[in-house]
Amino acid sequence: MARSASKAAAARRNGFLIAAASLLLLIWVFPLIWAVIVSLKSESEVLAYPPRVIFEPTFQNYSDALFGGVSILPSLVTSLIVSTSTTILTIIIAVPAAYAFARLRLRGKKWLGFYTLATQMVPPVGLVIPYFLILNKIGWLDTFQGMVTVYLTFSLPFAIWLLVSYMEDIPREMEEAAFLDKANRFQTLWHIILPQVRGGIAVTVIFIFLNAWNEFLFAVQLGGNTVRPVTVAMFNFVSVEQTLWAKLSAAALVAMLPMIIIGIAAQKQIVKGLTVGAVKGGGRL
Amino acid sequence: MTAKGHVSLHGIHKTFGTFEALKGIDLDIQPVEFFALLGPSGSGKTTTLRILAGLEAPDDGRIMIDGNDVTGTQPGERDVAMVFQNYALYPHMTLAANIGFPLKMDGVAKNKIPDLVRQAAARVKIDHLLHRRPGQLSGGQQQRCALARAIVRQPRLFLLDEPLSNLDAQLRLETRVELKKLQRSLDVTTVYVTHDQEEAMTIADRMAVFLDGDIVQVGTPDEVFNRPLSVHVAAFIGSPPMNLFAGQLEQGAVKVGDYEIKLPKSPDHAAGDVTVGVRPSHIRLSDHGLPARLYLSENLGESMLLNFLVDDQLVKVRLPEVRRFAENETTALSFEPEHIHLFDQKTGLRIGS
């Protein structure tokens, strides 16, 4: 009796959760679905009122966005270069820095940690002009190295801060055991620490890559005409006279694709990052 | 060739912030000895072990291993192996990789590693588990893996930090025996930290008793148990520990309340207040002695532990046989002069031999 009652309660609870999740999902997915629909319509059909539900789908917008007169293809390559370079450099610098924060007894470590976090609190828009002036002075305006350097100033503190928490979770004894096993600090980092924070690194890579890929404000101000990532190139389809909604949607969906693929591919890694190391009293649980 | 693994510590001082963990200890550990560092938590025994390993640097003092001053050297340069309390196995590696790691770091030829790993694993009977990861093992198997990782490169010194404390009671007893056997067969100096005095008593050749950052006694288990040098050691060693009474030393006798015990020979100490210690197993129930009332009796199966109240003081008595007692039963407790330990009431130090 009691069991069936509790079963019914569980079913009700499940039903409620599913309904709530569906609603949230719908709210999130609606613009995406709308974009997909718009991208498959012709420009004239997009503006038809009332909007037509039944129409003949066309892939013309995709081919125009990718290979047409105002193709976003070069911008996709630019985005890829900028995002990948930012991510790689961030990881190369952030991993040893996070290790130092997590393990070494450094003077002023606490203040440095606070400073690292404080950089995340500055509103980016306040930095546009100083960055513009600095890049202009050293001749890095409209250059890849300029863009990547600017992105690094945001991604590094974030990555360090994220990785420190992963590294601090590894028991100190594990490292001490490695020292006694004649490993030096670098070998300990390489053989003992890094394999255990793989999940954390994967999560960091995704965040950094996503942020760099989606960044617009600095790209539009500091990239000029030479470095035009895909977020800026979207504006190819917006002009004073008209907005090419169908092509814009197609371009936006293409630009989103790598992110979606990475998200799906990394899902496993993220979960693994949270469950790796099931040793008693050790590892990241 | 002289045996390896002679350790001596000279005047080791260590503070953590304002806490004085070690107050200038001296210690000499002979080659091939199984040496226990025994003490309650916070007494400095683990700090001593970590200083020996090179994981902590002493504020003051010198560490010598086989005549070489190793005070400033890195852990990896000391040729010592350690088993941590939580084993500190590398969770992302198989057992084979875990055990082989020190060999790999030591630059042993790659083709020789598997054989050495298998031999070490076989010694602790886990050679059938080499392909597994630590997470797939029981606590006892993990502990053996940690041991195998320690013995695989034949160090001159083993450091064991409460290696049995994470095992269940039954397994702890078995592993204790095996550990001792293993140490005998390897002939390696072993320093063993424990807060469990029974463990130290059974396993160690000699031991050092730590209290509040000081070594209060060094000796064989027999010496420490039968001749505690201070009232603190007496109160710490033994399960249950020694009963301590306030008494008066007089000419040729010692008095506890109205109960007088004649001493075979007068100790070299002025008459006056002393602390009288008697082990629970050395107290007899008789018709003369300290009047006592039974407070609680505990049946231990083969023996009994009786808790008596003498005035308001709880006194433990171990009886070698089991019999029934009535609650609140009154009796008298007596003890033989040769079983009495006398301590100076002010300094707490042992009086006489």
Image (tube, rainbow, N blue to C red):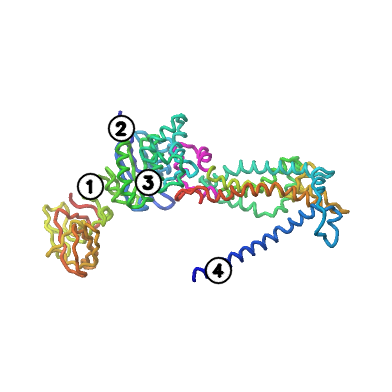
Residue under numbered circle 4: A8
Amino acid at circle 2: Ala
B16 or B189: which is nearer to us? B189
- Which chain contains the residue that carries disc 1? B
Find numbered disc 4 in the image and state the secondary structure of the residue it sits on. helix
Separation of disc 2 and disc 3 at Cα? 23 Å
Gap between marks 4 and 2, in whole Å? 74 Å
Q: At which x and y percent is residue B172?
A: 33, 49
- Residue beneath disc 2: B3
> What secondary structure is found at the residue carrying circle 3?
strand
Viewed as shown, does residue B70 lie left or right of B335?
right
Which amino acid does the dot numbered 1 rest on?
A: Asp
Which secondary structure is most common in the magenta stretch?
helix
Q: CA distance from mark 3 to mark 4?
A: 53 Å
Q: Residue A204 in the image: state x and y as whole percent.
A: 61, 48
Q: Is residue B91 visible?
A: yes
- Please indicate whether residue A270 sits to the left or right of residue A174 in the image: right
Q: Which mark, by number, is residue B161?
A: 3
Mark whose residue sits in front, 1 or 4 = 4
Q: Nearer the viewer, residue B334 or A121?
A: B334
Mark 3 closeness class: few <14, some 14–19, many ≥20 residues within 10 Å = many
Identify the secondary structure beneath mark 2. loop
Does mark 2 fall on the same chain as mark 4? no
Image: magenta residue range: A164-193
Q: Is residue A190 magenta?
A: yes
Q: Chain of mark 2?
A: B
In percent of width and height, residue A270 lies at 59, 49
Q: Which mark is residue B222?
A: 1
Circles 1 and 3, Cβ within 8 Å, touching? The answer is no
The quadrant the N terminus of chain B occupies is top left
Q: Position of residue B347 (x, y in %)?
A: 25, 55
